[in-house]
Image (spheres, grey):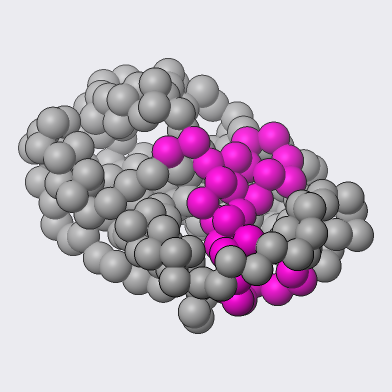
Amino acid sequence: MIKLNIGCASRPLKDYINIDIDNLSTLKKRYPGKKFDENLKIENFDIFNLPYESFSVDEVRADGLIEHLSFLEEPRFFNEVSRVLKKNGILQLTTIDFEKLVKQWLEAPDDWKDFFKNDKKSIEENHWFGTYTYSPINRWGYLTASIFGSQNGEGQFHKNCYTKKKFEAICKKINFKILELNEKKWKGDRDHIIELIAAKL
């Protein structure tokens, strides 16, 4: 079986071909607290032109990737996934639930404290616009970084957004059947996400 994990970052998966814009040494620097298997191989394939024949891949996973793709890159990605997947092949992805995130942002206090910092010390201390916490205690901390991306490095900006209705429309357009469309929380009180599992028709 050919199973792809596109945009693996700090979440490489066993038995998958892990693909990312960064190589392993860069990922180790970006995620200093994460232990990576020394034998792990990270492929730097072009995700819009994957090196696989049409109808040859069994599964494509993409966790926390598609919000980093621009409006013009979005159709290229979904069409490429559709091209490589076999009939009944599975697409499984997660992304920020933008509707819930914006609601959370609007309900939080408008209490700006300081400019965003991305020096090494600030990154290590989780500095978000004057806050040093992942807790959504105001609009201008982690919630703003969730909308626009952490912006601590290349490829971390968010350029797009998704809702359950948008996924329903995308799957209809590219001829996929939705198997599951779930709302989840990634960590505690933060990061509302949508999980899509769909099969190519």
Residue 124 image position (x, y, % from top left)? 83, 63
Q: Does 9 sit above or below residue 189?
A: above
Q: Is residue 129 at all visible to an observer of this figure?
A: yes
Q: Identify the residue shown where x is 48% and y is 64%.
A: 105
**In front: 190, or 44?**
190
- Magenta segment includes 9: no
Q: Residue 184's x, y, as percent?
A: 35, 71
Magenta stretch holds residue 156:
yes
Q: Residue at the spot x=45%, y=43% of the render?
A: 67
Residue closer to the observer: 173 or 93: 173
Left or right: where does residue 45 sit relative to residue 97?
right
Furthest residue to the bottom?
188
Q: Is residue 18 visible?
A: no
Quadrant where the C terminus sits is top left
Residue 125 x %, y %: 82, 67
Q: Is residue 132 left or right of residue 97?
A: right
Counting the numbered discs, the total is 0
Give the left or right position of residue 180, taking residue 120 as reference: left
Q: Residue at x 30, y 31 (%)?
A: 78
Q: Is residue 115 above or below residue 188?
A: above
Measured as percent of width and height from the top left, residue 108 is found at: 51, 72
Residue under the image location 59 percent in, 48 percent down: 149
The image quadrant of residue 4 is top left
Part of the protein shown in magenta: 131-160
In the depicted view, which residue is nearer to us: 77 or 138? Answer: 138
Q: Is residue 135 left or right of residue 163?
A: right
Q: Main secondary structure of the magenta part?
A: loop
Give the quarter of the image for residue 35: bottom right
Q: The N terminus appears in which quarter of the rendering?
A: top left
